[in-house]
C-alpha cells in the first residue's frame, strides 16, 4: 500500500447545495421519486424502497460490472472532458503546451488504425532489453527500471511521508508483484478461484503469443509467471493486516537491511531506482519483501525474465493493439468482474489522459464546469459538519475527557481541500510525441516517478492533491490530516445548486462526515493531529472503541452477499465506521437547519425522511455476481446495498423517521446497535 488514503468508494458520489438553510420558497431541484419502489416496505429493505425504481430503470450496460448513480456522474464527466478535448483539436495549440499534449495523447488513444498496425512494436525495445538479461544483477537493474513505468515486479518502492514523522518524506518498500489483485486468487482451492487461475494462465499464454512468442515459450512463461506470483502471494500480508498501520511500519537503517530483511544488492538497487545515498528506509512488510528477494536469488534467470516480460506486457496491454486489449478484457473484465462488453475506446482514452495529465485536464475542467459559489457552499457545509462532529465528540459518554481533548484538537486541525489545487502542476518537462500511445504512457509514468523522487528527503508538501479535480471521488489522508472533495463530484446529478437542505445533508453532508470520521476510524484514529502514527488515546478508551467497533465487524460478517459468501466485516470496518459516523454527524448538523425545525412535508415526505432517501440514492446501482465476489475480496467498502441496509439499522433517527417497528426485518434492538461517533 503506497499511501493510506481513504476514498469514499472506488467511484464516489456526492450531493450538495445550500449549506445552512434552504432558500425561501420551493426548491427547484428535488429527489426523483420515480427512483423509489413504494411496493417495498422501508423496514424490510430500505435500499429496495429508496432505489428499486432506479435499479429497474437502469439495467447494467454491457461494458459495466457494476453500474450506479456514481457511474452516471462519471459518464457525464467523461462527456464533458471529451468536449473540452475536441475543442482543443479545433484550434492551433503551441507545441509543448498542455493543450497540445492533452489533445495529442487523446488522439493517439482513439487512433485504432495506428494502434492495430503497430501491434506489439511499441513494447519491442523493452522486451529486447529483458531478453538480454544474463545475470542476477541485470535482473535487479531491470526490476528497478520497469517499476518506473509499469506494475512493480517483485516488490514496490515509493517516496512518501514517514508515518512517525509526517512532515518529512522518506523511501518505502512494500509488498507487490502479483497481477490478480488479491493473494486469495492464488491460494484458495474452491472451484470459482481455481477457474479464475485457469483463465489467468490462458491470458498470460495469449498475451505472450500476441507479443511474438511461440506457443511453447508462451506455455512455459505462463507456468513461470504463475509460480513466481503464487510464491509472492503466499508471503503477502492479508488485507486485514494491511489495515493495521503499526504492522506496516519498520524503519530500518540501510546498513541493516541485509540482516533485518535479506542479503541483497541494496546499494545497486537503490542506485538504479534513483535513491542512492539514503541512510534509512521503511520496509512496510518485511516477510513479503524477503520472499521476493529469495525468488530473485534462487530462481533461474530465464524464469525471472519471463516474469519481467509479463510485467511489461500486462501493464502495456491497454495501450496496444486490439489483440492485446481484447485478451486483457476477457480476463479482467469478463472473468473477474462479469462485464459483457469492452468500454468504448474514447472513454478508455479519457481515462488514460486523466491518469497521465490529470491536473492539465482539471484546469480546463474547473474553468468551465466549477462555479465559485459551489466552493463557497462546500466550505460552509464543511464548517457545519466540523461543528457537529465536535459536539458529538464532546457528548460521548464512553470517552474520557483526556482523549476527547486530543480528538477535538485533531478535528480543529483538519486541512480542507475543495474543488482544485491552489497551484497547478507544471507539465512542461513531459513530452508527448507521435511515436506510440504506449511510449507516451511510459513518458507520463516516468514524469510522475521523477516528481515523486524529487520529494525524497524533503519536507512534505501538504498542498499536494492526490486526486485530480475532475475525479468523481473524495478522500481522507491521515498523514496530512486532510479531507479533499474534488470538483468532479460537485455537479448534477449529485450536486444541486437549487435543492433543499434535507437532500444535501443526506448526500454531500454524509459524505463530508464520512471523510471526517475516517480520521477517527480503526486506522485513522492511530494518527495524531500532525499525521504521525502515535498513541493519543488512553488505553481504556482504546479498549472501549474496539469493543464498539467490533459490533460492526460482527454485524457485517453475518451478511451473505451471494450464495454462501459472507461480507468481510473486519476488512470493511474503516468504511463502515465512516458511513456510520457520516450519517450520525450529518443528521446532527441537519437538525439545526430551518427546514428540519419547521418539519414541513415536501413531495409527501418529512425532512428527516428526505435525508435518508437522499443517502440511499447515493448507492443506487446494480452489480453482477462476478463483481460481487471480486469486490468482496478487494474492496474495503461494503457493497452499495449494504451501505444502506446494514448501516441504517444502527441509526436511531432512521427508525423515528420511518416508524420502523420490532416486527420489521431490518429492526435491530437498541442494545445491539453500534454507537461510536
Image (cartoon, rainbow, N blue to C red):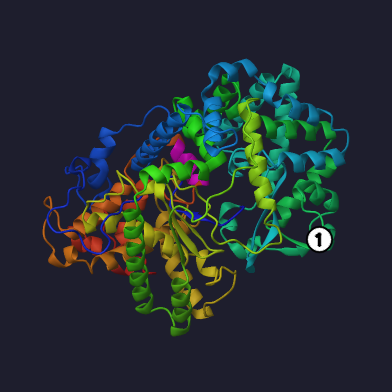
Using the rendered image of the protein, determine whether residue 672 is visible from the camera's viewpoint.
no
Up the image or down, 49 lies above or below 3; here it is above
Q: Is residue 13 left or right of residue 570?
A: left
Q: Position of residue 226 (x, y in %)?
A: 69, 34
Q: Secondary structure at mark 1?
A: helix
Q: Would residue 470 be seen by someone viewing this image from the given angle?
A: yes
The residue depicted at 40 percent of the width and 78 percent of the height is 398
Who is closer to the viewer here, 515 or 55? 515
Q: Is residue 170 left or right of residue 134?
A: left
Main SS of the magenta segment? helix
Depth order, front residue of 637/344 = 344
Q: Is residue 257 above or below residue 71?
A: below
- Residue bearing mark 1: 254
- Residue 536, position as x, y percentages in the image: 54, 77
Q: Position of residue 428 (x, y in %)?
A: 62, 42
The reply to whether the magenta stretch includes residue 629 is yes
| Count of marks placed on residues | 1
Q: Nearer the viewer, residue 313 or 458?
A: 458
Work out whether residue 213 or residue 628 is closer to the camera in this orientation and state it: 213
Amino acid at each position: 500500500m503506497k499511501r493510506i488514503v481513504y476514498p469514499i468508494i472506488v467511484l464516489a458520489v456526492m450531493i450538495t447545495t445550500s449549506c445552512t438553510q434552504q432558500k425561501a420558497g420551493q426548491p427547484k431541484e428535488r429527489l426523483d421519486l420515480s427512483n423509489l419502489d413504494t411496493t417495498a416496505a422501508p423496514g424490510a429493505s430500505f435500499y429496495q424502497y429508496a432505489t428499486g425504481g432506479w435499479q429497474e430503470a437502469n439495467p447494467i450496460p454491457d461494458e459495466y460490472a457494476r453500474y450506479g448513480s456514481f457511474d452516471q456522474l462519471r459518464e457525464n464527466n467523461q462527456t464533458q472532458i471529451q468536449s473540452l478535448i475536441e475543442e482543443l483539436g479545433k484550434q492551433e495549440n503551441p507545441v509543448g503546451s498542455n493543450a497540445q499534449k492533452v489533445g495529442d495523447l487523446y488522439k493517439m488513444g482513439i487512433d485504432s488504425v495506428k494502434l492495430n498496425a503497430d501491434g506489439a512494436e511499441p513494447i519491442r525495445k523493452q522486451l529486447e532489453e529483458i531478453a538480454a538479461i544474463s545475470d542476477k544483477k541485470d535482473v535487479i537493474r531491470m526490476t528497478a527500471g520497469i517499476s518506473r513505468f509499469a506494475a512493480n515486479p517483485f516488490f514496490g518502492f515509493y517516496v512518501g511521508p514517514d508515518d512517525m514523522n509526517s512532515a518529512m518524506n522518506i523511501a518505502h518498500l512494500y509488498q507487490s508483484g502479483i497481477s490478480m489483485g488479491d493473494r486469495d486468487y492464488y491460494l484458495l482451492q474452491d472451484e470459482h478461484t481455481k477457474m479464475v487461475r485457469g483463465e489467468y494462465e490462458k491470458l498470460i499464454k495469449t498475451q505472450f503469443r500476441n507479443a511474438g512468442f511461440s506457443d511453447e515459450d508462451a506455455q512455459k512463461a505462463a507456468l513461470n509467471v504463475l509460480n513466481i506470483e503464487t510464491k509472492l502471494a503466499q508471503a503477502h500480508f492479508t488485507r486485514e493486516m494491511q489495515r493495521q498501520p503499526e504492522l506496516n511500519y519498520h524503519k530500518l537503517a540501510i546498513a541493516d537491511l541485509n540482516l533485518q530483511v535479506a542479503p541483497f544488492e541494496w546499494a545497486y538497487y537503490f542506485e538504479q531506482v534513483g535513491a542512492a545515498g539514503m541512510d534509512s528506509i521503511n520496509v512496510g512488510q518485511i516477510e513479503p519483501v524477503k520472499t521476493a528477494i529469495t525468488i530473485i536469488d534462487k530462481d533461474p534467470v530465464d524464469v525471472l525474465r519471463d516474469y519481467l516480460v509479463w510485467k511489461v506486457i500486462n501493464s502495456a496491454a491497454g495501450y496496444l493493439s486490439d489483440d492485446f486489449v481484447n485478451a486483457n478484457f476477457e480476463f479482467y473484465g469478463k472473468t473477474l468482474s462479469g462485464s459483457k462488453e469492452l468500454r468504448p475506446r474514447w472513454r478508455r482514452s479519457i481515462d488514460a489522459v486523466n491518469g497521465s495529465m490529470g491536473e492539465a485536464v482539471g484546469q480546463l475542467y474547473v474553468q468551465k464546469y466549477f462555479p465559485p459559489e459551489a466552493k463557497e457552499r462546500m466550505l460552509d457545509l464543511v464548517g457545519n459538519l466540523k461543528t457537529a462532529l465536535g459536539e458529538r465528540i464532546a457528548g460521548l459518554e464512553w470517552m474520557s475527557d483526556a482523549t476527547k481533548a486530543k480528538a477535538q484538537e485533531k478535528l480543529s486541525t483538519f486541512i480542507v481541500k475543495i474543488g482544485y489545487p491552489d497551484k497547478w502542476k507544471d507539465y512542461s518537462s513531459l513530452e508527448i510525441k507521435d511515436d506510440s500511445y504506449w511510449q507516451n504512457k511510459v513518458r507520463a509514468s516516468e514524469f510522475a516517478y521523477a516528481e515523486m523522487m524529487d520529494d525524497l528527503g524533503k519536507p512534505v508538501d501538504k498542498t499536494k492533491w492526490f486526486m485530480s479535480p475532475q475525479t468523481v471521488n473524495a478522500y481522507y489522508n491521515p498523514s496530512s490530516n486532510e479531507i479533499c472533495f474534488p470538483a468532479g463530484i460537485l455537479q448534477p446529478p449529485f450536486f444541486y445548486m437549487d435543492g433543499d437542505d434535507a437532500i444535501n445533508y443526506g448526500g454531500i453532508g454524509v459524505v463530508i462526515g464520512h471523510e471526517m470520521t475516517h480520521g477517527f476510524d480503526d486506522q485513522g484514529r492511530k494518527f495524531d493531529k500532525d499525521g504521525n502514527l502515535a498513541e493519543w488515546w488512553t488505553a481504556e478508551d482504546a479498549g472501549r472503541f474496539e469493543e464498539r467497533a467490533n459490533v460492526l465487524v460482527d454485524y457485517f460478517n453475518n451478511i451473505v452477499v451471494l450464495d454462501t459468501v459472507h461480507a468481510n466485516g473486519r476488512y470493511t470496518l474503516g468504511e463502515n465506521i465512516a458511513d456510520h459516523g457520516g450519517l450520525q454527524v450529518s443528521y446532527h448538523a441537519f437538525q439545526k437547519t430551518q427546514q428540519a425545525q419547521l418539519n414541513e412535508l415536501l413531495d409527501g415526505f418529512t425532512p428527516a425522511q428526505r435525508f435518508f432517501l437522499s443517502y440511499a440514492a447515493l448507492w443506487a446501482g446494480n452489480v453482477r455476481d462476478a463483481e460481487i465476489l471480486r469486490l468482496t475480496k478487494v474492496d474495503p467498502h461494503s457493497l452499495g446495498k449494504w451501505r444502506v441496509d446494514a448501516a441504517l439499522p444502527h441509526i436511531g433517527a432512521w427508525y423515528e423517521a420511518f416508524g420502523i417497528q420490532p416486527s420489521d426485518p431490518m429492526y435491530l434492538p437498541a442494545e445491539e446497535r453500534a454507537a461510536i461517533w
